[in-house]
Image (cartoon, rainbow, N blue to C red):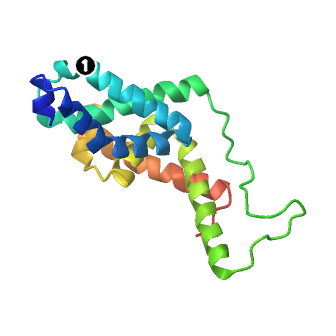
Amino acid sequence: MIRRFLEGEEQAFTEIVRHWETKVFSLAWRYLGNREDAQDVVQETFLSVYKSARNLRDPDSFPTWLYRITLNHCRTSWRRRSPELSLEEPVPCGVDGEGEVTRTAAVASRQQDVLEARDMIRRALMGLSDEHRSAILLKEYLGLSLEEIARVMECPLSTAKSRLYHGLKGVQRNLARIGFRP
């Protein structure tokens, strides 16, 4: 697909978008924590890819290049929003206005627990530096190897390992701070 697009076949770009948009959206959504902002990043990313694909020297490095562009747009969006996310903010717990639990079924309760855990993990990730959050998202959500993470983040392998390690430690600290109990 990439080679065909680079050779001038416009239809190949549509195939590229179809093939990669879910992964790009997933990375952006997890990075930003907001669906609308993530959709904007997807559009900006593929617009950048379309405009600058001719500069891509090695079509085999496309995934790394694409994730780098995505992260750059995520960072721009993050700075533009300048979020004020507090780790101490209460997490919605599925209760009504008087503090009473609104669901009684065991399945609904378990589903709510999962949603709360996801929200807490998301908040813990948002409390990290850009480098640490990016390393975790690339590893845990996209399944990239440490070598691939180093290429996407344009850093030595040892730095990628360090960012991942310290990022995971940061998530643990942030989860403990907001009271997460597995």
Residue in the image at 44% along x and 31% along y: 41
Residue 84 appears in the figure: yes
Taking the image as shown, residue 129 lies to the left or right of residue 20, namely right
Q: Nearer the viewer, residue 73 or 128?
A: 73
Image mark count: 1
Amino acid at pointer 1 = Ser
Disc 1: which residue: 52
Residue 148: % across, % down: 23, 43
Viewport quadrant of the C terminus: bottom right
Taking the image as shown, residue 131 lies to the left or right of residue 11, namely right
Residue 120: % across, % down: 61, 55
Residue in the image at 52% along x and 38% along y: 32
**47 shown above or below 17:** above
Residue 116: % across, % down: 64, 61
Q: Nearer the viewer, residue 107 or 164?
A: 107
Residue in the image at 12% along x and 36% along y: 60
Outermost front residue: 11
Taking the image as shown, residue 57 lies to the left or right of residue 115, namely left
Residue 109: % across, % down: 67, 74
Q: Residues within 10 Å of mark 1 (few under 14, many from 20)?
A: few
Residue 156 appears in the figure: no
Q: Quadrant of residue 8?
A: top left
